[in-house]
Amino acid sequence: MKAELIAKFAARFGRAPAVIARAPGRLEFIGNHTDYNGGTVLGVPIDRGIWVAVAARDDGRRRFCSEAGGAIKTLPVENPPAKQRGAGSWLNYPLGVIAALPEFGLRPPAGFDFLALSDLPSGAGLSSSAALELASALAFLALGGQDAPRATVVQLCRRAENHFVGVPCGILDQGVSGFGQKDHLVHIDCRGPSFATVPLPAAARFWVFNTHTKHALVDGLYAARHRECMAAAQLLGVALLADVSPAALEAARAKLPPVEFRRARHIVEEIARVDATVTALRAGDLAAAGRLLTASHRSSQLLFENSTPELDFLVDQLTAAPHVHGARLTGGGFGGAVMALTTPEFSEAQATAVATAYAEKFGARPDVLRASTGDGAALQ
């Protein structure tokens, strides 16, 4: 990808890039919507991601291009930059990073040429947005001769998504992309936030089934779940749902309307599942981890209601198949992808059979990705 990026940058801008950065996508292993509720979460940095190349300009212009976007988009240097709409809305991720830099005592770049390239499927719950933010942040800092602690970069990118893009996400996506390590999961205590890695047993394998169904995060259901969780916490008299145990929630059930109770129950039980999954992985018990993944999906399906018939069908098919430890939706939900944790014996033929059954039921074939772990965001 690096050689391809350099060649395309030269073709678009007539010169070589000065800085190249890459950040991985991620699989949400377990911890669905726990992050903005102050809980814990486990994520998998994968070996696919987004590459960004930049070179400085001295004429007060910022020129952006992506492999997907085609034509070069030229913007004036503004502080803060203006939010983009329509086909140019992908620019809001690097622009959001630029807008957030001064809030962390860092200088935004002035004029530059910018090219983004990806081998990460978009809209599949693999967090291409966070990968673009992390790669952009590292490139902009290097272009200006600046450095920052990794935790600062991660929080800066989350702020870009929360306040500029407008998605009320937690720290999961940026944290896993920023702190990834091959053959490890990233464990995040979102209250800190604090970041650690958990070794992944060697026999673990990941498969991703991308349904290509829409998951509308900015303008709808994700924001609604965020509001419902905050409302539940307020009614329970706590700052965040992470402050409530499953037993305490059950004791306070009468305080909550049915919808808010279901949302809160999912969150507090999901946090407990994250902790149990860490214990299972440290013991090398992939079967136990898989059962927890499937339980997580059923909770998303029935309590948090952020699954879809397409995702439920894939989970049903996968959990009935040999060599599958467990399966669940990965990412915000409302469409997107399902992740399966399997043994090495789970085959391409089995994955194809699941995809074929899905196509027969829904009339469209899901993409199948055999994912491997990868390292976190870095300059190249």
Image (tube, rainbow, N blue to C red):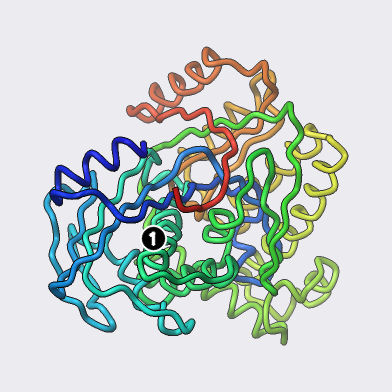
Position of 88 with respect to 358 (left or right) is left
Residue located at (60% from left, 68% from top): 151
Position of 322 with respect to 79 (left or right) is right
Residue 60 position (above or below residue 13): below
Q: Position of residue 310 (x, y in %)?
A: 46, 38
Query: Is 16 in front, or is 188?
Result: 16
| Kind of residue indicated by mark 1 | Ala
Per the image, label 1 sits on a secondary structure element best described as: helix
Query: Is 231 in front, or is 171?
Result: 171
Residue pointed to by mark 1: 139
Query: Is 22 in front, or is 358?
Result: 22
User: Tag count in the figure?
Assistant: 1
Position of 157 with respect to 170 (left or right) is left
Q: Position of residue 254 (x, y in %)?
A: 74, 78
Q: Quadrant of residue 92?
A: bottom left
Q: Position of residue 308 (x, y in %)?
A: 47, 46
Q: Quadrant of residue 289?
A: top right
Residue 185 position (above or below residue 367): below
Characterize the local packing of mark 1: few (<14), some (14-19) or many (20 or more) Cα atoms within 10 angstroms: many
Residue 76 position (above or below residue 184): below
Q: Residue furthest top?
A: 349
Quadrant containing the N terminus is top left
Residue located at (18% from left, 57% from top): 87
Query: Is 135 in front, or is 43?
Result: 135
Q: Position of residue 80 (x, y in %)?
A: 28, 82
Residue located at (42% from left, 44% from top): 124
